Each structure stands twice: as structure tokens, then as C-alpha cells.
Image (cartoon, rainbow, N blue to C red):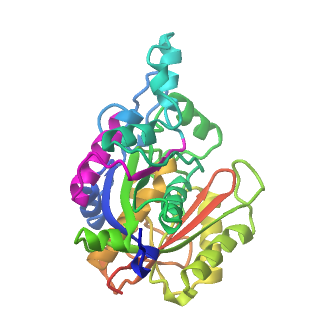
Amino acid sequence: MLWDSDSDRVVVTGVALRSCLGNLEQTWNGLCVNQIGLRLAAPFPQLPAYPLGLIQDTPFTVSGLIVPVVKELLLASGLSAPLPECAVVIGSSRACQSQWESLMRNGTFEGWENMFPHQAASVAAAIIGSCGPVVAPMSACSTGIWAIAKAYQLIKEKTCLQVIAGAIDTPISPLVITGFQQMSLLSKNFCSPFDSNRDGLSLAEGSAVFLIESLKSARDRGIIPFAEIKGFALSCDAYHMTSPEASGQVAAKAIKKCLQNSGLLAHDIDLIYTHGTGTVMNDQIESKIIQSIFPVDVHIASIKGAIGHTLGASAAISAALSIVSLDQQMIPPAVGLKNPAFPLNFSKHATKAKLFNILNLSFGLGGQNAALILQNFNC
């Protein structure tokens, strides 16, 4: 196979998403009018009500959520199965944990063979008929960026021309809720990242998947990409399983390496999609890191006040919405932010802006740090 320079550029040509605000279009439109998809819910009788990001009245399973998202991606990308040469990289933080909990409560293990950690990737591969690499990364809240990074590598290495990549989490289960409550990380109110009165995160369901391919593949199909993947970087604090390292130096290292890998400087970044969980320490340290690297006027996006924290899917969802930001040249408002605790450049309303480079940040449990830069393809 002959490869030209277009084969070395990696682009995004399709996006599909589900959140508690709906699909990609519904979620974006909801964000832009300060809509909150979280609602007080008690899906388990043994637990009190919490603000949760449920997509429907009852919690989703991994298979139940990944099927419609992948099918929507195929439609949006102009592709149809079978796609035997297309790789799949879809990760999850909690995978099928909620289903395993259900089996334990019911005292049966019927169907256990459909509840492995790689379930989402396997289901997606079956939908498209993939005979290529099928990978299921798990890197806490940074899983979505790691999945996109792996897709980028597969294309750069010329293992394949196209990859369906992304992440999913359906974490609303008794054990997950109780675990986060025991760590004092759950908000008793509605999640309000970077607010002086923030008191924790709100768990939510969600998924975002992308068609990632070489520019040559996209041009051969007559497709204009949504965005180009300029670079990424990963690091680990090696500090604590649940607490972020206070100095933020290792997390900052991932951001600086991402800029270097992308051939960009800090002032080239127009908008940062933050991790912004709404917990006291995470928001404080993330704010400190941003202020230490970037100009004071860099635009800041914060979305978890609207759609909650989807754990392993959160970074993929942020990446999907940042692609819409590039397409619409629009910064969404920081939903739920009333009294900013930090001098960051948030928007109260959807704001038009000239956007070329968007940085996505994710900081997961265990010190899993990730940064990803997406660039307007027409830039």
C-alpha cells in the first residue's frame, strides 16, 4: 500500500454521544442555554436520593448504551457494516460493574459471560464486523483520552486506516454511589465545578465515540474532517489512589508534553475543556495548574455542572463537545457556576469566539493525568 503525507495526519470524521441531556445535538444545545440534565433520583431503595445524570428513568447497562451510540456514529460518518479493517478502541472505568452487582443481589450468575470488562469494545466490534485490533483501555477518568490516543497510534503506525474509538460508563449502582459517598466526594446539592460553594461531584451515565482515520482515508471517501488530532500526553502522579498530588507538577508535565507533541505553545490554546469535577481539591489543583501554564485570558469550559461526572466516559464526552465548539466557533457556559472560586476566564453564556486549538484535560483516580489537543481542520 502506498502512503502519502495525508496518511500521517489523523483526523476525526464522525462523532456520536449520549448524556443525560440527550444525543450530541441535544447535549450541545442544552449546554448553550444553561440546561442542567442532573436530577434528584433514588434508583435503589436502600440508598437516599442524590443528584444523578440518568439518561432514562432506570440505569443503563453497558450493552444497552453502546449499541445506539455506535449505530448513530456509523450513520453520522457515512459508513455501514461490515467494516472488517476498522479497529475498535472503546474503554470504560466501571465497565459492567453495575450488572455484576445486580447478579449478586439477585443470587444468580445467568448471563455473566456477557459482562466482561471489554464488553463495550466487543459489542461495537460485533456491530461493525471488525476483524482488526479490538482494545478496551481502562484508565479511570482519563480513559476517553487514552482511547483516542491509542486510535491515533494505530493510524500513525499504519496498522489501519480507520478506528472507532471512545469511552462509555454506566456507573450508577449501589456500590459506586456508596463508594464515592464514603470518600466524601458526592455532592449533596447539584454539582457546581469551580464554585466557591462546590461540595462534590454528581455521578452520571454517558458515552462518546468517534470515527478516527487518516486524512488520506477521509479524502478518499470525500469527507471533510471535523477536527485534527494534534497531540496528546499522559502521566501518573504515583501518589495516592484517590487524592491528587497537591503540587500538580506531574499533571502539569502531561500538559506541557502535550503542547510539545503538538508543536504548540501555551498561548496557542484558545479554549480549555477542564476536568472540573466539582470536588474541593481537584478543582483547586486544576485551577492552579492552568494558571501556572496559560495566559489569564485563555477561555475555560466546564460541563459537569450540566451533565455530571461520567467517570471513564467524561474525557471522551469533553472531546466530543470540544469538536462541536470548533465547528460552531462557540464556547459553552459553565453551567452551575455562580460564585467562581478562581480567577479563570469562564463564560456565563454561550459565547462566540475564534477557536483554532482546544485542549482537553482529564485527571483520574490513581493520579491518571491526560491531555489532548484538537485543532480546527480549516485552521
> Above or below — where is 50 with respect to 331?
above
Q: Name the side, left or right, on which 129 lies relative to 293.
A: left
> Which region shows up in magenta?
64-93
Work out which residue is located at the far right of the displayed protein and give it. 239
Between residue 160 and residue 208, name the one nearer to us: 160
Counting from the top left corner in percent of width and height, residue 359 is at 49, 74
Q: Looking at the image, which residue is at 61% across and 74% down?
A: 255
Q: Position of residue 156 (x, y in %)?
A: 51, 68
* Residue 325 location, quadrant: bottom left
| Residue displayed at 43% across by 45% down | 204
**Which quadrant holds the N terminus?**
bottom left
Who is closer to the viewer here, 238 or 217? 217
Where residue 153 appears, as percent x and y from the top left, is 53, 64
> Which is more toward the observer, 124 or 328?
124
Q: Is residue 92 magenta?
A: yes
Q: Position of residue 135 (x, y in %)?
A: 51, 47
